[in-house]
Image (cartoon, rainbow, N blue to C red):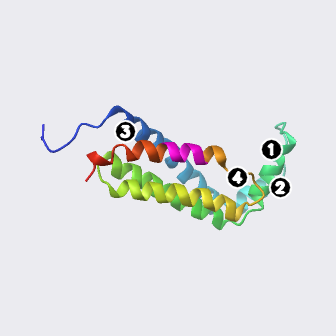
Amino acid sequence: MDQNIPVRPTLLTVICILTFIGSGASFLTNISMYTFFDTFKLVYQEGAFSAFILAKEQKEVLELLFNANPTYYLFQGLFYGLSLAGAIFMWNFRKPGFHMYTVAQIVLLILQQVYLPSLPFPAFEMLISALFVYFYARHLSLMH
């Protein structure tokens, strides 16, 4: 074993894997939403979700999401991709990944406020992002 390669701590492994899953799925979802926005909106307008019993709040959020500017989903997808790339860098002990991830998380919080200002402030998402940034920052000394 090469003496220069640090052993990846369990916490770093766990948060990277969680980021791979969360940011990877969000990247695919948002890019798909941007690419097929008109189709998804048409399917929604034709009542595709009418078989589901949705609470009033859920219907209001769906209306808001399908009336959003499609570039919102493009930007979301790109910044989730940056978040994913940052986690891949950190998995490989590359410090620039921390900065990529952190910038992506901040921008993702701002994007919702810019494109969907009528949604409540994403306090829970901000807390989770702050925790992940904190946990990643604890491992910066291992990265180069």
Can you say whether 34 is above or below 23 in the image?
below
Residue holding disc 2:
45
**Mark 4 or 2, nearer chain start:** 2
Rendered residue at 56%/61% (across/down): 107
**Mark 2 or 3, nearer chain start:** 3
Q: Nearer the viewer, mark 2 or mark 3?
A: 3
Amino acid tagged 4: Phe
Graded by Cα atoms within 10 Å as few (under 14), some (14 to 19) or many (20 or more), the crowding at tag 2 reads few
* Mark 3–mark 1 distance (CA, rounded to whole Å): 35 Å
Q: Secondary structure at mark 3?
A: helix
Q: Nearer the viewer, mark 1 or mark 2?
A: 1
At which x and y percent is residue 56? 87, 43
At which x and y percent is residue 76? 58, 59
Magenta run includes residue 31: no
Is the residue under label 2 in contact with that under label 1 (CB below 8 Å)?
no
Rendered residue at 39%/47% (across/down): 137
Q: Nearer the viewer, mark 4 or mark 2?
A: 4
**Mark 1 or 2, nearer chain start:** 2
**Mark 3 or 4, nearer chain start:** 3
The stretch in magenta equals 126-131
Residue holding disc 3:
12
Rendered residue at 40%/49% (across/down): 87
Can you say whether 56 is above or below 44 in the image?
above
Q: Is residue 127 left or right of residue 100?
A: right
Amino acid tagged 1: Gln
Amino acid tagged 3: Leu
Graded by Cα atoms within 10 Å as few (under 14), some (14 to 19) or many (20 or more), the crowding at tag 4 reads some
Instruction: Tell me, for residue 121, which label it has, or none.
Output: 4
Residue holding disc 1:
58
Which of 80/93 is in front?
A: 93
